[in-house]
Amino acid sequence: MIAEILLGTALATSVAALSLVSLKLYIKLSTGMCHSQVCLVGKTAIVTGANTGIGYETALDFAKRGARVILACRDETKAKEAYNKIIAETSNSNIVYKLVDLTSFDSVRKFAHDINANEDRLDILVNNAGAGRLGNKTTVDGISITMQTNYFSHFLLTILLLDLMKKYPSRIVNVSAIGAKLGRIDFAKLTSFTNESNQYITSKLCQILFTIELANRLKNTNITAYSLHPGVIKTEIFRNMSPAIRWIILFLIDTFFKTATEGAQTQIYCAIENGLEKYSGQHFHDCKMVKRYKSADDPALAKKLWEESERICKVNGVSYN
Ligand SMILES: NC(=O)c1ccc[n+]([C@@H]2O[C@H](COP(=O)([O-])OP(=O)(O)OC[C@H]3O[C@@H](n4cnc5c(N)ncnc54)[C@H](OP(=O)(O)O)[C@@H]3O)[C@@H](O)[C@H]2O)c1
């Protein structure tokens, strides 16, 4: 009897261990990597939130390829640290950092003004910065902090940089998340706080809808746009969770999911892979184009969100041709 129990326990443990190893193997094998050899010498790229996480890894990759990389960060100390690390690792000294706080339209406008005044080209814009669990806070512009950080400020920044980007073939990459599948746009509450997880997934759904309409409006230009889900990645994005929950999540991610280098691959791919122009407006995951989530597969919704975003961000008279 005891022998049977021991045998049963050993079997169950082996099946569990085998399942976990298979899961880990499956995730590792399906992790898309960008194998492009594209050189970025002579090109300029901006990455928002480039001081840490997948933004840092994206900036590092562009720097290795020889690009002029502008690290768009809100914290000077962190920005400087990332800047020093990237130069030390790549020997590319054509790296700069500039400050922008996405919780303020004024800061975004100042940043864009600086770029337009001082850069003669912009080939890649990666709207990467993001945050979750920011609570029921309202920005100086009277908008829910999560919606402004993750979506509205990137919308405004993009619009303000379009004329510069039109000078040469260029790409805009909007970082979303798979949670956008569960998102729903309520125009009556677009700028106000609803609840923590709803705010995050709505902002990420907005990033996809924004990409769809952006690609549509830019179809007669040489700018293309892409959205993506980067995967589940061990970064600082979970910093605002309670320590116990954060520990469990990071342990699981560490064991089964992506490193920051792996997590950056899809946005690097969307920014540089040759021949993606015909897929402008599409959504990517693991360095592959994927079917649009049902929640985002609605051009009329994308158009309406665009019009509301123009009104909220106070952008008028922009020519999209
Ligand atoms: N990690 C994941 O599993 C995962 C999954 C799906 C999607 N994503 C998306 O991937 C993107 C990058 O996230 P990550 O995982 O790399 O997270 P992260 O390590 O927390 O990096 C986020 C970056 O955004 C910056 N940021 C936050 N608020 C800002 C503000 N108000 N103004 C300017 N910069 C701001 C942060 O700057 P500070 O360091 O100064 O705060 C940091 O550089 C985000 O859009 C996130 O939603 C991540």
Image: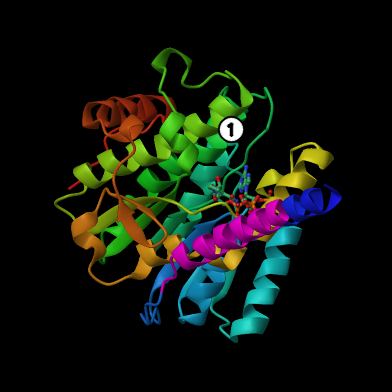
Magenta-colored span: 11-34
Crowding near pointer 1: few (<14 within 10 Å), some, many (20+)?
A: many
Q: Residue furthest bottom?
A: 91
Q: Is residue 50 visible?
A: no
Which is more toward the observer, 167 or 270?
Answer: 270
Residue type beneath disc 1: Thr
Q: Quadrant of residue 86?
A: bottom right
Decide: is 177 above or below 270. Answer: above
Decide: is 45 above or below 37. Answer: above
Q: Residue furthest left?
A: 220
List x then y, in percent, for residue 63: 52, 77
Image-based side of 146 in relation to 203, left or right:
right
Q: Quadrant of residue 67?
A: bottom left
List x then y, in percent, for residue 94: 53, 78
Q: Name the residue located 44 percent from the left edge and 46 percent from the top edge.
A: 157
Q: Residue furthest front?
A: 1
Colouring rule applied to residues: rainbow
Which is more toward the observer, 21 or 253?
Answer: 21
Q: Is residue 209 visible?
A: yes
Q: How many marks?
A: 1
SS at badge 1: helix
Decide: is 102 above or below 296. Answer: below
Q: Main SS type for the magenta part?
A: helix
List x then y, in percent, for residue 217: 21, 42
Image-based side of 24 in relation to 266, left or right:
right
Image-based side of 70 in relation to 123, left or right:
right
Which is more toward the observer, 63 or 280?
Answer: 280
Image-based side of 22 in relation to 275, left or right:
right
Q: Is residue 307 magenta?
A: no
Q: Name the residue located 58 percent from the left edge and 36 percent from the top edge.
A: 104
Mark 1 sits on what residue? 146
